[in-house]
């Protein structure tokens, strides 16, 4: 087979299209799906919208997934737990009916190679969620240690000139407006208060994070003893959307870093934008932020924005 450097342009485009289609297929499969497919859960009192915008227009290094717990046969699991006398498990499983999960990540870089890491993360994350539901009845914070170890093993080959890594945030939105989350080096949420008409600073106690995924081994792995640092138990943070109209943003650094980090739309323009659209649906808020961002300075990285709003 001839090296890809000698492929005609048509063949390269065809192969790239296959990569794009495969990434879409993998991310949309099963209980984890992107909102643009329309297969995502709704909760009373919560409005949200989220989408990935790859820098190159096709594939990139951003990751987004929504967990619809109703697709994990909760009814059957609850009934089985009740029959076996495991009331605690049944109660834990039932809590999933009042929440959905959302994961957002950012692999270093924004090309085809990074999209391969994104797909690997998706497969590992999906398997871990299924295993957690089966064992514990819910997703626990311990999964992030296992996800870190999966990526650490996947990208530690000695021939790699630069070890890829990923920031990652997973949280659960409750129908009362609570958001509980863990983060591995990923930016914490941005909260806009409708009462105070401004972006509210979140206390450090509610933004605790571990290191990005894939950099260090997890604490239980044999390689951990060779490092000064390892990924220990990851702290769980919680924020509240107490007032109807409050807005929470989850995002990747396409929102905060433009022109190689010289500009920061989030610091310079975002609050004013949110003031102007605070009464609009989540989809409108998202689209307005994106439009204003591109008018300010088109991002030079992948862009993912999730808008979660208390009704």
Image (spheres, grey):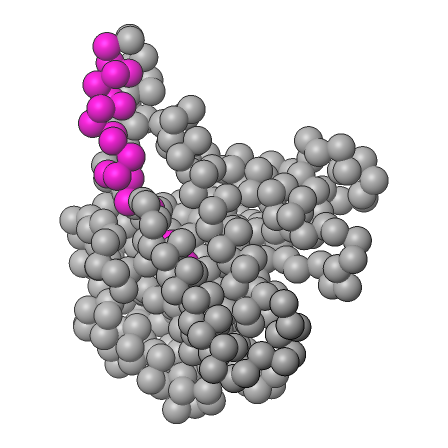
Is residue 39 within the magenta segment?
no
Q: Looking at this view, is 258 or 130 the one in front? A: 130
Is residue 76 within the magenta segment?
yes
**Residue at the image position 20 percent from the left and 51 percent from the top:** 42
- Left or right of 130? Residue 4 is right
Q: Is residue 267 above or below residue 36?
A: below
Name the spot of residue 149 as percent of width and height, x first. 63, 41
Q: Quadrant of the C terminus?
A: bottom left
Q: Residue furthest front?
A: 1
Which residues lie in the magenta part? Answer: 64-83
Quarter where residue 227 is shown: top right
Quarter where residue 111 is shown: bottom right
**Residue at the image position 39 percent from the left and 91 percent from the top:** 295
> Would you say residue 204 is visible in this rendering?
no
What secondary structure is the stretch in magenta mostly built from? helix
Q: Is residue 190 above or below residue 179?
A: below
Name the spot of residue 21 as percent of width and height, x first. 39, 64
Q: Quadrant of the N terminus?
A: bottom right
- Left or right of 276? Residue 258 is right
Name the spot of residue 174 as percent of width and height, x first. 28, 45
> Would you say residue 147 is visible in this rendering?
yes
Q: Looking at this view, is 10 or 142 the one in front? A: 10
Q: Looking at this view, is 167 or 65 the one in front? A: 65
Name the spot of residue 168 as percent of width and height, x first. 52, 54
**Residue at the image position 57 percent from the left and 38 percent from the top:** 146
- Left or right of 130? Residue 16 is right
């Amino acid at each position: 087979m001839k090296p890809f450097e000698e492929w005609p342009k048509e063949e390269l485009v065809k192969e790239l299209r296959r990569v794009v289609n495969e990434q879409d297929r993998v991310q949309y499969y099963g209980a984890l799906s992107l909102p643009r497919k329309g297969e995502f859960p709704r909760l009373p009192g919560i409005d949200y919208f989220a989408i990935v915008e790859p820098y190159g227009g096709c594939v990139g290094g951003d990751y987004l997934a929504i967990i619809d717990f109703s697709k994990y046969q909760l009814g059957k699991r609850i009934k089985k737990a009740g029959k076996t006398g495991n009331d605690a498990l049944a109660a834990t499983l039932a809590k999933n009916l009042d929440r959905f999960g959302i994961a957002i990540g950012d692999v270093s870089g924004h090309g085809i190679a990074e999209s391969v890491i994104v797909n690997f993360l998706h497969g590992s994350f999906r398997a871990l969620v299924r295993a957690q539901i089966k064992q514990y009845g819910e997703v626990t914070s311990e999964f992030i240690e296992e996800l870190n170890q999966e990526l650490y093993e996947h990208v530690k080959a000695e021939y790699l000139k630069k070890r890829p890594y990923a920031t990652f945030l997973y949280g659960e939105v409750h129908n009362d407006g609570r958001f509980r989350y863990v983060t591995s080096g990923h930016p914490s949420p941005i909260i806009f208060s409708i009462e105070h008409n401004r972006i509210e600073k979140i206390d450090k106690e509610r933004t605790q994070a571990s290191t990005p995924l894939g950099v260090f081994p997890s604490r239980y792995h044999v390689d951990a003893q060779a490092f000064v640092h390892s990924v220990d138990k990851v702290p769980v943070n919680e924020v509240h959307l107490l007032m109807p109209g409050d807005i929470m943003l989850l995002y990747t650094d396409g929102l905060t870093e433009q022109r190689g980090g010289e500009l920061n739309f989030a610091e310079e323009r975002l609050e004013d934008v949110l003031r102007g659209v605070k009464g609009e649906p989540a989809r409108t808020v998202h689209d307005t932020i994106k439009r204003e961002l591109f008018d300010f300075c088109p991002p030079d990285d992948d862009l993912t924005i999730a808008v979660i709003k208390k009704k």
